[in-house]
Image (cartoon, rainbow, N blue to C red):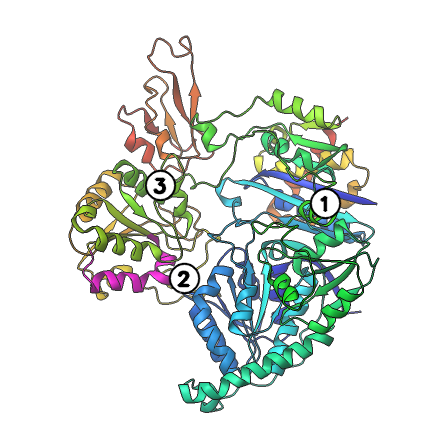
Amino acid sequence: MKMDVVISGVGGQGNIFASLVISQYAMNKRLNVLGAETIGAAQRGGAVVSHIRIAEGEIYSPLISRGQADLLISMEYVEMLRHIRLLNPQGAYLVNAMKIPTVLNNMGLDEYPEPEEILKAARQYCPNGYVIEAAATAKKLGNIQMTNVVMLGALVRIMPFFDYDEVKWLINANSPERFKDANIKGFEEGFQLIN
Amino acid sequence: MNEKRILLSGNEAVARGAYESGVKVAAAYPGTPSTEILENIRAYKGIYAEWSPNEKVALEMGMGAAFAGARALVAMKHVGVNVAADPLFTMAYTGLRGGLVLVTADDPEMHSSQNEQDSRNYAKFAKVPMLEPSDSQEAKDFTGLALELSERFDTPVMLRSTTRISHSKSIVLLKEPAEQTAEPKLVKDPLKFVMLPANARKRHPVVEKRMEDLSRFAETFPENRIEWGENKIGIITSGISYQYAKEVMPEASYLKLGMVYPLPQELIRSFASRVEKLFVVEDLDPFIEEQVRAMGIAITGKAAFPLCGELTPALVAKGLKGFSPLPVDEISRNLPARPPIMCPGCPHRGIFSILSKLKLYVTGDIGCYTLGFLPPLSAIDTCVCMGASIGNALGLDKALGEEALGKVVAVIGDSTFLHSGITGLLDVAYNKGAVTLIILDNHTTAMTGRQDHPGTGFTLKGEEAFQVDLVRLAKVLGVKHVKVVNPYQLAATERVIKREVKRPEPSVIISQAPCVLSRRERAVTGKPFLVNSEVCTGCRACLRLGCPAIMWVKENENEAGGKKRKGRALIDHFLCNGCTLCEQVCKFSAIKETNGQ
């Protein structure tokens, strides 16, 4: 088996936590794991992307190549489409229903495409996509920072590779004490978002 | 089984390697992609770890520790080696007593650098051996091996990483630290350590002899290994390139080099003679390729792989197979770019909005403030290396004289000033430059993730330390006119900048306000501001600040409610840090503070 995962978003959206949970899950299954992170742009609103490669056999490159990813998890529309070509069209993408304009969009110097257009382009490339109200759910639960755990809940629902209880346990183990309960709640709600 | 198996980045693995192999002293100046090495070493007991003011000092202090017989690690990014090159070259002559490893993290593709120089050339130039790991396990193991080789051959050893090794994660088996290494002590050995010409002339042949010994050693060094596959294609490679090649052509035969300098010539000859076609896959320069070619062996390298930028599995596939099963362009749609930007509430924004308004020629430096180059501020005209802003401004002044007066200003961050700016300012004062320097003092090394430095009052270990006073420092260097400004007060700051740039004498303006991400201090309230949509005229003055919290909302005639505007400004409640700059630039008093709700 192999599972190549790309997580994309904007600095501060919790990519790193999500990639940590996924990597540890694979480590606990005694699988091979490689990961690559973009660091540096994260704190300044730049685009961030993590690659996580999981396999039973030998894997070498920490970078995922075009058409290779089984799963693309995106915290935002544009950052989903930016990386969609890393996805195998037979794979699946999971996108948080949220647009985060760039500073140039804000200034009116370029345009943030309509989410509907973005989703249309994504669907043309890969039919198997899930648009999740993760940020809205996190906000409803009291903290938009929980978007990432809501996304992890939805991920477990669509990818049988991930075991519900084990991922929940890992979220709990990796959360700071004061966020443990809220993060678990976010994960559970995320799981319910997909029927 | 005491072995623990965890996922580590290359940088975390180097830090662990230092701990496991008994390093006593570690030093660095932060620089992407090397920064996390020292940030991780600081947590290990028994290692003295410091942020040094710059890489040269870091290497010199590591060298002193090794003179005492302690094991030392010094880390830096590739351009840091330029700064540390002076001690490096002579250290190859003196040798050491304890082991010393110099870790250089190269940045092919320039993810966060001003050039993509290939540090392997330094190994050859300075005549020191260099190891290059291919994953985190090797990053850890090679750190220990480098220290062993350093002691065995009495030489500093370089360990070369790249961004993809430093910032990629793979599984590492941890070990407990080795038995205590030899206790450091003071031993005089002036013939070896005093590089007067008479002594150095005796040491140079030692260096040449050592390189011969190392070349012989390289032939049987277990980390230079052949992995036999099909004999049609043989690939010589190292570092991350090895992983990419294995990924796309696992069936080929490999000569994987753990030591990239000096090269094992006999091993290469024997490998080359047993394969039909020979490739070398290496990031950046044709470093291995040229040496193999000089041995009279036909090899394909840069003819098939790019010289500029970093390799990827797709580029390696294209080079090896002549076509790529994985097309190289990964983003075909024209999506809006999302470059890093100054944070909402960043203290640099006020200064750059003024420099932009005054249309000054700004000699820039290395740090977050280099982002002042980007639109809409567009207020940086040069950026070369750490400290260059000051020398560049002095050169402009001496070449242009009166012509440049009032038109040029140099900007540098506090950490960069202490790294390499002090001597530049000394030159300005000594040689009577009509130069104005703005020190953007945000009390941290912000760009690399807020590390401490001699101006912050804290050490890497978090202990309190003497805090250098930049005003007094500028004065003792010989600058008479030193002004401190608050960059959140635009009008007052603009007056000072206008007056100082016209001064035909050296002057320094210190813009003092903590980084908005600082964990220790705050200069802004954090209470968001609000645009009154009734009052906003849509003039865009606030948008020219380039603040990510301020948005433009387009309006048609109906939406504008009879107002003559094409849109209006809107402040993102969550992003705004309440820095007041937009309130100050709004001529219509449309922007007001909220009560934080």
Name the spot of residue B411 as percent of width and height, x first: 31, 50
Q: Which residue is painted at 71% across and 70% down in the image?
A: B175
Name the spot of residue B313 as percent of width and height, x first: 69, 48
Q: Which residue is mark 1?
A: B322
Q: Which residue is painted at 54% across and 65% down in the image?
A: B121
Q: Amino acid at mark 1?
A: Gly
Among numbered discs 3 and 1, the one appearing first in the sequence: 1
Q: Is residue A96 left or right of residue B533?
A: right
Q: CA distance from mark 1 to mark 2?
A: 50 Å
Magenta segment, which residues?
B412-433
Q: Secondary structure at mark 1?
A: loop
Front-most of residues B331 and A163: B331
Front-most of residues B448 and A140: B448
Q: Is residue B570 left or right of residue B184?
A: left
Front-most of residues B202 and A62: B202
Residue B473 visible in image:
no
* Chain of residue at mark 2: B
Q: Which residue is mark 2?
A: B453
Q: Amino acid at mark 2?
A: His
Foreground label between 1 and 2: 1
Discs 3 and 2 carry the same chain letter: yes
Q: Secondary structure at mark 3?
A: helix
Discs 3 and 1 carry the same chain letter: yes
Q: Which residue is mark 3?
A: B349
Q: Which residue is painted at 54% across and 56% down in the image?
A: B33
Q: Amino acid at mark 3?
A: Arg
